[in-house]
Amino acid sequence: MKKRAVRGSRTGRPVMALLDLLGRRWTLRILWELREGPLTSRALRTACDGASPTVMQTRLTELREAGLIELLPGDGYGLTALGLELNETFLPLHRFAERWSKQMQA
Amino acid sequence: MKKRAVRGSRTGRPVMALLDLLGRRWTLRILWELREGPLTSRALRTACDGASPTVMQTRLTELREAGLIELLPGDGYGLTALGLELNETFLPLHRFAERWSKQMQA
DNA sequence: TCCTGTGCTACAATAAATGTAGCACTACGC
DNA sequence: GCGTAGTGCTACATTTATTGTAGCACAGGA
């Protein structure tokens, strides 16, 4: 855990830092899986097709430092108010994915 | 280039395949940089903080196969109708990133 | 005490990204 | 024609990230 700063944060453009954070493996998926409520770290690993605990823990730490998720003792990990707000941005993604999938088959 | 299928596509849930595709490094950033019009592959590399041509080319191929971008001879890479639609989902991200950045400083 | 589950870590093996260099092709000016 | 500059794209060695397996310490509950 040597590199704490979010990559792209040097540019001074927050959206770049955010895109970099979200562009790391499993990050989007983790936020997505938490959309309906908190999950324990192990449930999260199961939900994410058995992602390795190493990277899962790394992502959880990153997301926690970014203030998007938090560890609720007894309930596992859940979205913060900020994380919930971000997640709402992605809600249309499900509908889009269905449309996208159909177009790809054609 | 051995693994062509989008990871997560086995699950039969398109949103998982989409999240996996978008969760690869530079993918979100590329879509973002194309939001205001086509860019050549080299302009794109410059815009993405000098991403290596290897991974840039890999992402461009993936996004092209996903039908989100296309190569317009003479203009470089641009969003398809589908890609444009997806990108509109991310437009609120900029405003969110500003808010997020401010909260993080506090 | 002995389970079971939690968050989390070590460590070697594998896969992905980087950085540098360069190719083939096209279009332009001379 | 010739050189120059731009395009999309690739090779290859190095560095970094991710995986997979195993396991730790701790906190309940039976």
Image (tube, coloured by chain):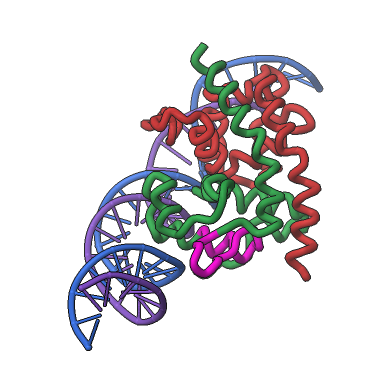
Chain colours: A red, B green, C purple, D blue
Query: Which sits in the foreground, A60 or B67?
Result: B67
Question: Residue A41 in the image: x percent, y percent?
Answer: 64, 32
Find the magenta span and give its range: B59-77
Query: Which sits in the foreground, C7 or D18?
Result: D18
Instruction: Examine the rendering and report whether any part of residue A57 can be seen.
Output: no
Question: Residue A50 in the image: x percent, y percent?
Answer: 64, 47
Instruction: Examine the rendering and report whether any part of residue B57 can be seen.
Output: yes
Picture quadrant where residue B43 is located:
bottom left
Q: Residue at x 79, y 56 (%)?
A: A99
Question: Residue A37 in the image: x percent, y percent?
Answer: 77, 28
Q: Residue at x 45, y 53 (%)?
A: B44
Please say if A59 is above or below B105.
below
Residue B49 part of the magenta segment: no
Query: In this image, B21 relative to C14: left or right?
Result: right
Query: In this image, D8 relative to A42: left or right?
Result: left
Q: How many marks?
A: 0
Query: Which sits in the foreground, B13 or B26?
Result: B26
